[in-house]
Amino acid sequence: MGVEIRESPVTDADFEQMKRFVHDYLAASVESEDGGGRMRWYPWHSAEYRFNHILNVVDLATRIARREGANMDVVRVAALFHDISKLEADQDVHADEGARVAREYLEAHCEYPESFVDEVCTSIEEHSYQGPLSDLPLETRCLIEADLLDKVGANGTTLMLLRMGYEARTHMDASEMVKRVLERGEDAVRRIESETAESIAHQRLKRVRWFCEWLESEVVEMESIDDPTEDER
């Protein structure tokens, strides 16, 4: 009776092929929709942004998995496919649809053990879970933490500032918009379980708060953003 073990982990060549597939799938999702894609006028609903977000999550999730002792192959493959259906499916079903696409790809193009494919697809299915992360397998937690972290820091701040133009706001609204990034980051920290992700979150939030202070110091009458840690000092 044979043991279901792949001779080597996910190779760089395998992963590069997966990346090309995900990129092309996202592009095709946008091109196939009437009017240029769902909410295409918001940059974060474009294929370019979605693919960049995915790569950011892959990088973060791999870093967290390495330090926390998770299965890095499961984590990075799940991270790569986690939002593949984001542009073609409704928000409440995009995780399930992404898992379906990932399973079809992995079973058709690779020879990974069924258990590996199941772990990857389970992580994708559960990456939108809103409950305590302690309820989930370590690999899924790494993916969710990475997904949360990409919305915090420089990337999240830039997107919020871009949003000002689409909402016909002026630069005087900048501190209000950046405050949303801080609030989102503080919510993320409350959900995060791993020390690795928590450290990254605090570092990113520190930079966002510094940016707020910079805005306030140079723009007259800019709304001040209170530091929630002041009361603790």
Image (tube, rainbow, N blue to C red):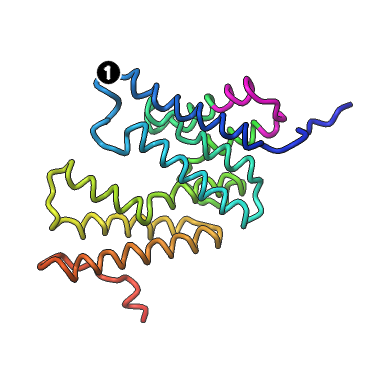
Image quadrant where one finds the N terminus: top right
| Residue 46, placed above or below residue 60 | above
Q: Position of residue 216 (x, y in %)?
A: 19, 68
Q: Disc 1 marks which amino acid? A: Asp
Q: Residue furthest right?
A: 1
Magenta stretch: residue 109 in it?
yes
Q: Position of residue 15 (x, y in %)?
A: 59, 34
Magenta stretch: residue 110 in it?
yes
| Residue 107, placed above or below residue 163 | above
Q: Residues within 10 Å of mark 1 (few under 14, many from 20)?
A: few
Q: Position of residue 200 (x, y in %)?
A: 47, 60
Which quarter of the figure has residue 90?
top left
Image quadrant where one finds the C terminus: bottom left
Q: Is residue 15 left or right of residue 127?
A: right
Residue visible at 70% across and 26% down in the picture = 111
Residue closer to the observer: 160 or 90: 160
Q: Position of residue 157 (x, y in %)?
A: 30, 54
Range drawn in magenta: 102-116
Residue visible at 55% across and 60% down in the picture = 196
Task: Please identify the dominant SS of the magenta region.
Answer: helix
Residue closer to the observer: 216 or 94: 216
Q: Is residue 106 left or right of residue 175?
A: right
Tell how many labels. 1
Say which element carries label 1. helix
Residue for badge 1: 34
Q: Residue furthest bottom?
A: 233
Q: Is residue 221 left or right of residue 162?
A: left
Residue visible at 55% across and 30% down in the picture = 18
